[in-house]
Image (cartoon, rainbow, N blue to C red):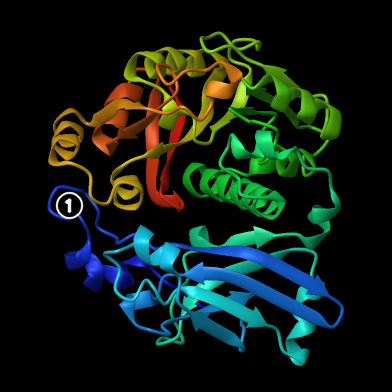
Amino acid sequence: MYIMKQSANLNLKPFMPHKDRLAISEVPYFWNLNSVYIEKKKVIINGWALPYFGAIDGTRISVNGHQLANTVFADSEEVAQKYPWWPNARRSSFSINASGDELTLFDEEELVFEAVPTTEKSVDINKKLALYFRPGNMLENFPDEVIQNRIGSQNSFHFSMMGLTLARQFVRAFEEYSGRLWANNGLIVDWGCGSGRVARHIIRELNPDQHFMGFDIDKSAIEWANVNIAPLFKQSRMDPPLDIDSAAVDILLAYSVLTHLSLNDMRKWISEAARIVKKGGYFIFTILSDTALVNLMPYAETSIITEYSDKGIYDTQENDQLESMGVSGDYYRNVWLRENFIRSEMQEFFEVVAVERNFHYYQDVVVCKRK
């Protein structure tokens, strides 16, 4: 079994932008799958992976714990431009043709892909860097490109893979930091659910004692989810309240929601979360922090870094991603939050149990328990 702590890439920190101004102890590592093509006698996998330790050919891809043999790396101008500070980032594109004796690996119902280092054989791979994929899910219905693009999904493959990956990671984070079993919670709510990218995977694994509700401001996405997944979704407004009773929720999830709310709006919604989450229940959400600055704005102006460092929040960057559905950049924006700032904002209603960096690519996760 591979164990790989991100800190193994600490030797790359001198190359990292704003390294002296950002609170990053672990250099964030990134990789992705672009496609997985599976037939009875053929499996082809394409993607990109930053080379571990910055070394050419320092990375291999594994599936269900087996390191795949026929991995061919090539140049990627796109990755080179996105991670100009990572040594040999250009040599990140890979293609894999599974060998004959590897084909049976892909008969499994669920595939777990990991990027692993080639230079160490008994290291520990951090599971939060894994990507989960069920080939059978590709036979399901998917929302149209307009709805998918509103959440930044490139295609139906990514929509399915990332949805399952996030579902798996939310369960892992909850159980790891709460010490409780996911299956013992009654009502799970996905706030900012979109068309159910994550929710569809949560819903299909509910036990008879569990219930689910999803909320989003995107009317067309909610309508699609109600027809194609289950009638468990409701349209919300840009301001509280949600259509749900007080102290009713065991787990409230919010992926990439507080990443787009100004301080004033964020405070309204934190109060609303406190209203609906029962005492001892959990609010689990993602944020953009120092990790996201390295990925999304590696060469941000000094004034931005200074404002973010001094205030603990940078919420003045508008985002027009939802303009087509009548949500302006005045409301929907890109927001960065430092850990000490979010802890301060949550303390009236919630105990911050954990803040995990690099939870899903450049987004960190905050696990909070209702006081």
In this image, 84 relative to 171: left or right?
left
Examine the image and state in which quarter residue 263 appears: top left
Place residue 8 in its image quadrant: bottom left
Where 156 falls versus 4 (above or below)?
A: above
**Callout 1: 10 Å neighbours few (<14), some, many (20+)?**
some
Q: Return the x and y of residue 123 as percentages of the image width and height.
A: 43, 79
Quadrant of image for the N terminus: bottom right
SS category of the residue bearing label 1: loop
Residue 272 is situated, as x and y percent measured from the top left of the image, at 49, 13
In terms of depth relative to the viewer, which is nearer, 319 or 140? 319
In the rendered image, residue 344, in percent from the top left (x then y), is placed at 27, 25
Asked which quadrant contains residue 51, the reply is bottom left
Q: Position of residue 70 (x, y in %)?
A: 62, 88
What kind of residue is marked 1?
His
Q: In the image shown, does 319 or 190 lie closer to the viewer?
A: 319
Q: Residue at x 50, y 82 (%)?
A: 73
Where, quadrant-wise, is the C terminus in this rendering? Answer: top left
Residue 189 position (above or below residue 241): below
Residue drawn at x 78%, y 83% as measured from the top left? 103
Q: Which residue is mark 1?
A: 18
